[in-house]
């Protein structure tokens, strides 16, 4: 009998140890995000006079070597591979011919504190097409509607993994009506991924103002309609984190200034 | 004439093969689970307990891994219900009967944990717990299979001088379990590998010592030497797989999607980890058996009369 009791010790002890170890915390933020948003913002909406509105523009360059372009392996998914005749490459690091980078988020980081801007009612659109996200990167305003489409003949799931907003994960079969979503808190950036097709990733920058831009096929950005003032312009790239990533600019009424940034691989 | 009839296990032998089948499917389930992690498929099915509101979701992309894992898990759940009932009906040893119910409880908890993992978006502590509870469940089913086997019923004649083998075997099994935990923490939290490497060192030392003890014992049964050999071979393989996993992870650090060689090698690493644990649990159970036989033998030996 002693023997039987003893050999039970092993699994029972393992179980006990496991449950003891498991009592760690699971950090789920259950705050009412909408309520938080409503109490923090000033009530009066800032109107920018178009006659004095200023502009900041420029390019984002890269320095040094970049990782080689990665071809997306969709072969295992005929429903995705069949949508392309050409090889599809990852959009993580996309250099342009003029040594600039595509898909860099550029935004006013500081200088607009205390101002409130109207929330657009026009939705931003995020499409799933060819088993990639279109666009790869975009900015929206806090609480601006985001319209999510599935233009593919295959099932996706849409899964943003924010740190400051609430996480969600929802499926989208082909031909379903678009999903309307919004993000009630500022966050640069929210990764969005599809767990069905793990190469699919996109980023959404959520700001309490409309002053942001994403670099294009020649590395350019432009932020218009700014009230005159002193600003810190910041940039964010998914992979390249080092280099010149912020600039301070002072903009007079109707002024247009150019600032360039340079990113490089972490050494 | 065979002297090793399963007399001491009574009618328990009747469920032995069923327990073995359940253990095999559990092993398959662990492999399926490792494939889910490796392919980053954990959240490809956003709902639970149904998948895309159905029992038969679109069989596409990563949904194949996640839903496949759920199907094998449901099957193992059914096998475990049957096993627990069978053990309860046929098992004469009360503690073993309890083990059947514990296994059932763990498989239910594991299913719920799997659901929580999905509904809470894969928080690392839950994933680690789910990975470890899987190994715990595997130990329980392997124990049930072993305790109902004719090998368990054999009279054992091992004699192991020095430190009792059962303590060492328990320590080795405990260290291996700890190592699986450290592996899971490393994998799910992307923390440093050092604890897992130290764990590997500890496991290698303890398992090596245990094997040396078994092989040095001239009268160790074939069961003990067999389990010890298995442990040694699997451990060597596991160290190689671990090293390969690590090198492949480093080589593919900037990959934009799961890479087949990494998935294959890390899945094998998890699978062999489960087998090592099973081998160590069998060794631990068997050495308890040796000890208790010895105890019984000693208590049967009349005390030597002391001559005045
Ligand atoms: C005693 C031997 C070992 C055992 C039992 C063991 C067990 C495990 C287990 C069970 C996991 C995965 C846990 C999970 O996903 O839930 C794991 C992960 C891992 N182990 Fe080990 N391990 C051992 C030795 C080693 C060694 C020596 C190395 C490296 C040199 C290593 C490298 C790794 C790596 C890189 C991973 C993560 C795999 C991934 O990225 O998916 N292991 N180990």
Image (spheres, helix red, strand yellow):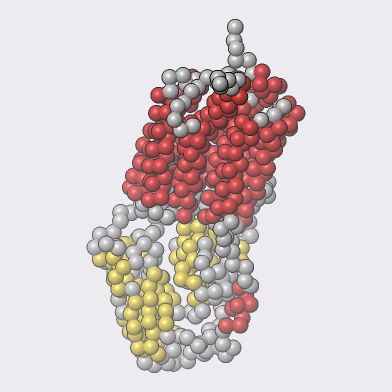
At a point 58% along the width and 70% down the height, the residue shown is: A182
Q: Is residue A249 visible?
A: yes
Residue B200 lies left or right of residue B224; in this view the side is left
Q: Which quadrant does the C terminus of chain A fall into?
A: bottom left
The answer to whether residue A40 is above or below residue A125 is: below
Disc count in the image? 0
Instruction: Find the residue positioned furthest to the top.
Output: B1
Nearest the camera: A111 or A154? A111
The answer to whether residue A164 is above or below residue B54 is: below
Instruction: Find the residue positioned furthest to the right.
Output: B89
Residue A184 lies left or right of residue A90; in this view the side is right
The quarter of the rendering in which ligand 1 is drawn is top left
Q: Position of residue A77 (x, y in %)?
A: 49, 44
Q: Position of residue A168 (x, y in %)?
A: 59, 61
Q: Position of residue A43 (x, y in %)?
A: 59, 88
At a point 62% along the width and 71% down the height, the residue shown is: A31
Nearest the camera: B151 or A221? B151
At a point 46% along the width and 85% down the height, the residue shown is: A112
Instruction: Find the residue positioned furthest to the front.
Output: B308
Q: Is residue B241 visible?
A: no
The answer to whether residue A230 is above or below residue B218 is: below
Nearest the camera: A98 or B217? B217
Q: Position of residue A11 (x, y in %)?
A: 59, 39
Q: Which quadrant does the N terminus of chain A fall into?
A: top right
The answer to whether residue B2 is above or below residue B131 is: above
Instruction: Find the residue positioned furthest to the left.
Output: A64
At a point 34% along the width and 44% down the height, the residue shown is: B247
Q: Quadrant of residue B241?
A: top left
């Amino acid at each position: 009998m002693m023997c039987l009791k003893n050999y039970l010790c092993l699994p029972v002890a393992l179980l006990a140890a496991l449950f003891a170890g498991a009592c760690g915390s699971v950090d789920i933020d259950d705050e009412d995000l909408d309520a938080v948003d409503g109490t923090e913002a000033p009530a009066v909406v800032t109107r920018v006079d178009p006659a004095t509105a200023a502009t900041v523009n420029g390019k984002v360059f890269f320095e040094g070597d970049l990782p080689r372009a990665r071809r997306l392996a969709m072969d295992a998914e005929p429903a995705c591979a069949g949508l392309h005749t050409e090889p599809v490459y990852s959009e993580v690091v996309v250099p342009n011919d003029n040594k600039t980078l595509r898909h860099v988020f550029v935004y006013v980081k500081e200088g607009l504190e205390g101002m409130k801007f109207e929330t657009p009612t026009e939705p931003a659109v995020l499409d799933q097409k060819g088993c990639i996200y279109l666009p790869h990167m975009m900015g929206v305003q806090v609480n601006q509607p985001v319209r999510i489409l599935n233009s593919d003949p295959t099932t996706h799931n849409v899964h943003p993994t924010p740190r400051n907003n609430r996480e969600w994960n929802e499926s989208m079969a082909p031909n379903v009506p678009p999903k309307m979503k919004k993000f009630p808190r500022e966050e640069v950036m929210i990764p969005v991924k599809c767990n069905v097709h793990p190469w699919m990733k996109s980023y959404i920058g959520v700001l309490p103002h409309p002053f942001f831009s994403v670099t294009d096929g020649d590395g350019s950005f432009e932020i218009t309609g700014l009230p005159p003032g002193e600003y810190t312009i910041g940039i964010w790239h998914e992979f390249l984190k080092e280099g010149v990533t912020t600039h301070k600019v002072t903009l007079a009424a109707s002024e247009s200034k150019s600032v360039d940034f340079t990113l490089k691989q972490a050494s | 004439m065979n002297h090793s009839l399963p007399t001491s296990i009574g009618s328990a032998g009747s469920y032995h093969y069923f327990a073995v089948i359940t253990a095999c499917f559990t092993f398959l389930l662990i492999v399926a689970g490792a494939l889910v992690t490796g392919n980053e498929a954990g959240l490809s099915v956003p709902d639970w307990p149904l998948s895309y509101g159905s029992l038969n979701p679109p069989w596409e992309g990563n949904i194949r891994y996640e839903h496949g894992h759920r199907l094998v898990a449901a099957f193992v759940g059914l096998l475990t219900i049957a096993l627990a009932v069978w053990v309860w009906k046929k098992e004469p040893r009360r503690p073993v009967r309890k083990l059947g119910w514990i296994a059932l409880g763990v498989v239910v908890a594991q299913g719920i944990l799997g659901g929580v993992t999905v509904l809470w978006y894969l928080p690392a502590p839950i994933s680690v717990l789910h990975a470890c509870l899987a190994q715990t469940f595997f130990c329980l089913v392997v124990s049930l299979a072993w305790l109902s086997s004719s090998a368990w019923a054999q009279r054992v004649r091992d004699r192991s001088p020095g430190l009792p083998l059962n303590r060492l075997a328990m320590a080795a099994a405990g260290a291996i379990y700890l190592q699986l935990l450290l592996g899971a923490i490393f994998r799910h939290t992307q923390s440093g590998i050092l604890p897992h490497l130290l764990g590997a060192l500890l496991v290698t030392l303890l398992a090596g010592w245990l094997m040396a003890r078994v092989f040095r014992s001239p009268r160790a049964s074939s069961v003990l030497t067999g389990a010890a050999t298995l442990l040694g071979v699997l451990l060597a393989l596991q160290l190689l797989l671990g090293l390969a996993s690590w090198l492949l992870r480093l080589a593919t650090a900037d990959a934009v999607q799961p890479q087949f060689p990494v998935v294959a090698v890390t899945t094998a690493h998890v699978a062999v980890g489960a087998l090592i644990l099973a081998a160590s649990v069998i060794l631990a159970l068997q050495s308890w058996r040796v000890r208790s036989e010895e105890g019984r033998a000693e208590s049967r030996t009349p005390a030597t009369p002391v001559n005045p």
